[in-house]
Image (spheres, helix red, strand yellow):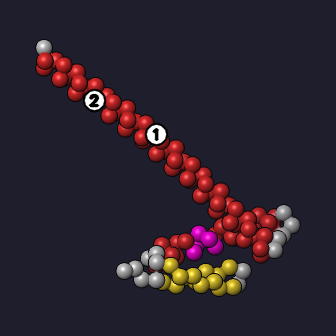
Amino acid sequence: MQTTRRIHIEVFGKTYTFETQADEQRAAKVGEFVCAMVERAQKGLKASGGGKDVAVMALAAMSIANDYLKLKEDHDRLLRTVRQRSQKLLDQSEEVVSAGMESEKT
């Protein structure tokens, strides 16, 4: 049975508490990542004239979603390549076995 842990993330001076079953290191890494993305979004909005907390959070969420979708596309592409190459190897090995069986018959 996994233990539920609470993690605390501070954003805009406000602490948010979440429950997770992830280990402490993983939970801390996720929290740090979210905070870094929020800081990045905040800097981007400040450079363009500022923004409200909600706008910063929305921009951070969009950036995280974009990164996630890019990684998912890369992962899907890699899986397709592995499947294609595996099928090619399987086909080639079947040809070799078939050729070997034919040569044994003669």
In the picture, the quarter occupied by the C terminus is: top left
Residue corresponding to mark 1: 81
Q: Which residue does the image show at 75% across and 70% down from the upper left?
A: 56
Specify whether 43 is left or right of 72. Answer: right
Which residues fall within the magenta stretch? 31-35
Determine whether the residue tagged by mark 2 lies in a helix, strand or loop: helix
Q: Nearer the viewer, residue 32 or 73?
A: 73
Which mark is drawn over residue 94? Answer: 2
Q: Nearer the viewer, residue 80 or 55?
A: 80
Specify whether 87 is left or right of 59. Answer: left
Q: Which residue does the image show at 48% across and 72% down from the upper left?
A: 26
Spot the residue most to the right.
49
Residue 29, magenta (yes or no):
no
Q: Position of residue 32 (x, y in %)?
A: 58, 73
Determine whether the residue tagged by mark 1 lies in a helix, strand or loop: helix
Earlier sequence position, callout 1 versus callout 2: 1
User: From the viewer's perspective, is residue 33 above or below residue 10?
Assistant: above
User: From the viewer's perspective, is residue 46 above or below residue 106?
Assistant: below
Specify whether 56 is left or right of 79. Answer: right
Q: Position of residue 10 (x, y in %)?
A: 64, 81
Q: Quadrant of residue 39?
A: bottom right
